[in-house]
Image (cartoon, rainbow, N blue to C red):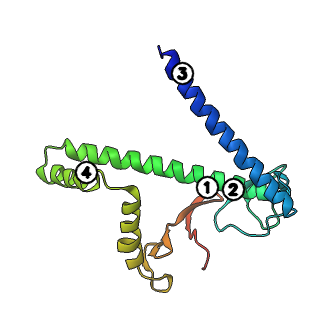
Amino acid sequence: MPRPRDLFIQGLVLGLVAWGLFLLLAEARSRMAAQGIPFSFAFLSQEAGFSLSEGLTYAPGEGLRPFYPSDTYFQALLAGFINTLKVALVGILLATFLGLLVAAGRLSANPLARGLAAGYVESIRNTPLLLQLFVWYFAVLLKLPPWEQALSWAGIVLSQRGLVLPELGFGSGAWGLGRSCQEL
């Protein structure tokens, strides 16, 4: 059970943070009012006027659909949330798969698999994520060929713009492979 003095100090710090936040918002409001800018969320209902390269948004009566420049800022924000959820879900699935694969390698009786898994773990462990992203970007992605000279095999295209995979197309009882990319 926390002592009363500890609770008092925590309450005091929380109160000071709340007071500082109040002063910050009051100052922002007064400076925005001096420049004739309203301090509200009303701008979220205005037309965005820009496009998103990757984004689904929700429109009442239409459900999920692509984001258009005529949509509102709120719908752009919603498209950002949906993109964040998609990236997080893919990241969780890939990290789980990679973790299980490396764990199986570490527990393997095969010395090569065990050594590769141990080398991977020891090289990645305690390396900042930002540094890992820089390595992937500068050492891997920028070394790939441009789109005009992309590597292509069996409908799979790999370039600096990313990896394009064929998609399964369902039509009139037959399974077909169709290209999932548009001509860029």
Is residue 104 shown above or below 177?
above
Label 2: state its secondary structure: helix
Q: Are marks 2 and 3 in contact (CB under 8 Å)?
A: no
Front one among 170 and 97:
97
The residues bearing labels 4 and 2 have C-alpha atoms spaced at a distance of 35 Å
Q: Callout 3: 10 Å neighbours few (<14), some, many (20+)?
A: few
- In the picture of the structure, the residue carrying the numbered disc 3 is 7
Label 4: state its secondary structure: helix
Q: Do the residues labelled 1 and 2 touch (CB within 8 Å)?
A: yes
Q: Earlier in the sequence, mark 4 or mark 2?
A: 2
Which quadrant of the view contains residue 38?
bottom right
Q: Are marks 1 and 3 in contact (CB under 8 Å)?
A: no
Q: Residue furthest right?
A: 36
Q: Nearer the viewer, mark 4 or mark 3?
A: 3
Q: Callout 1: 10 Å neighbours few (<14), some, many (20+)?
A: some
Task: State the image coordinates of residue 43 (x, y, percent, origin top left).
Answer: 83, 57
Task: State the image coordinates of residue 67 (x, y, percent, origin top left).
Answer: 74, 62
Q: Which residue lies furthest to the bottom in this view?
A: 148
- In the picture of the structure, the residue carrying the numbered disc 2 is 79
Q: Which of marks 4 and 3 is nearer the N terminus?
A: 3
Label 1: state its secondary structure: helix
Residue at figure coordinates x 59%, y 53% from the top left:
84
Residue at figure coordinates x 35%, y 50% from the top left:
98
Q: Which residue lies furthest to the top in this view?
A: 1
Residue 173 appears left or right of 77: left
Q: Which amino acid does label 2 sit on?
A: Ala
Q: Nearer the viewer, mark 2 or mark 3?
A: 3
Residue 63 visible at all:
no
Task: State the image coordinates of residue 164 (x, y, percent, origin top left).
Answer: 50, 69
- In the picture of the structure, the residue carrying the numbered disc 4 is 121
Is residue 9 shown above or below 52?
above
Q: What residue type is labelled 4?
A: Val
